[in-house]
Image (cartoon, rainbow, N blue to C red):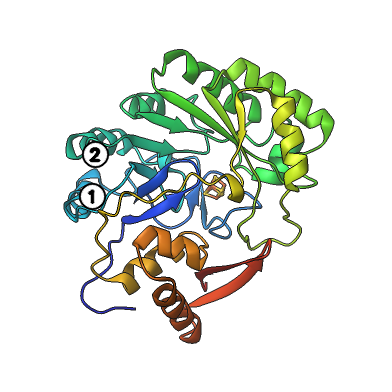
Amino acid sequence: MGTKREPPRLVFGPVPSRRLGYSLGVDALPFKTCDLDCVYCQLGGTTLKTLERKPYVKSGVVLKELAAALKGGRGIDCVTFSGSGEPTLNTELGAMIRGAKKLTAVPVVVITNGTLLWDKGVVADLMAADAVLPSLDAVTEGVFEELNRPARGLPLSKVIEGLVGFRQVYPGKIWLEVMIVKGFNDSPAHLRRLKERIGRIRPDRVDINSPVRPSDEAGVSPVPEARLAEIQAFLGPGARLVGPSKTTVRPAGGTRPGPADPGAEVFETISRRPVTAADVCRSFGLHRAEAAKLLAGFVAAGSAEAVRRSGKTYYRRRR
Ligand code: SF4
């Protein structure tokens, strides 16, 4: 890792996102604070599983870092609140979104697990976002328990009613993500119920995904692309695949200066999600040899590990 300056702690990237292009990420929570503990989570097990909303990270701290990152001038397609937990648990999320919109003209997006949209405070916080990308993987309590492992006191019926109600008041785009995990939620009966619930939620788009990146859990496998295509057809014209071959990542016209400290910034990114060397090249504008050297250096130093998944090598921080 480089030594020129400390890496940003709460703002990271830009990272190439399969749905959003180049996204400057904002982390509104301490590592792995979430009300779920999904079997496919790229961050590993949830360390603080909670339904308690509070100011885990202050908006002023986040916005100061965001302002500094935006001054760097690297071309981005959006600012995305996501990171290492569930952003709607932070009661300062609304202030962060409104503050971010004053700092940049690019869309401000929130990626959420969508479980807290029954909470009026969460809804109020999200109103200023340009797009909200909630998830819905399970439509029976059994699948919810097995796949998403919620905090105690979070019934699925409340989650779904929250999603339905949110659509009625939120004026921005809602892109619902469904993570299809082999053997968990891909049965025809579950998919039929899922389609019915999606019909009630009325998102602008449904993004169908499968866990291609490595997770810590054994038995978590992606569904083959041919089966995902069948599921897409079954769910209807509003559904699209977000597989690796359908990537939306694109170069930003060659105006993107490289990172000030590539080692620190790449390490910050692999701390949040597993990435390939190609991801690092695209995200940071590095030559392939330079990215490979950095990643190999992390592995040699014992700070990262290389994991093979779906025919690709991913690098992630060693925990
Ligand atoms: S909701 Fe997201 S952060 Fe939370 S456990 Fe699931 S995948 Fe991980």
Q: Which mark is residue 100?
A: 2
Residue type, label 1: Leu
Measured from the top left, where is residue 302 in percent x and y? 49, 83
| Left or right: 179 as drawn, with respect to 30 | right
Residue 201 position by quadrant? top right
Looking at the image, residue 233 lies above or below residue 277: above
**Residue at 49 percent of width and 59 percent of height:** 273
**On the image, which quarter does residue 7 sit in?**
bottom left
Q: Position of residue 11 (x, y in %)?
A: 30, 54
For label 1, the residue is 66
Residue 260: assigned label? none
In the rendered image, is residue 74 in sight?
yes
Q: Mark 2 touching mark 1, by CB under 8 A?
A: yes
Callout 2: CB less than 8 Å from ligand 1 = no
Expressed as whole percent of the image width and height from the top left, the position of residue 3 reads 25, 79
Element under disc 1:
helix
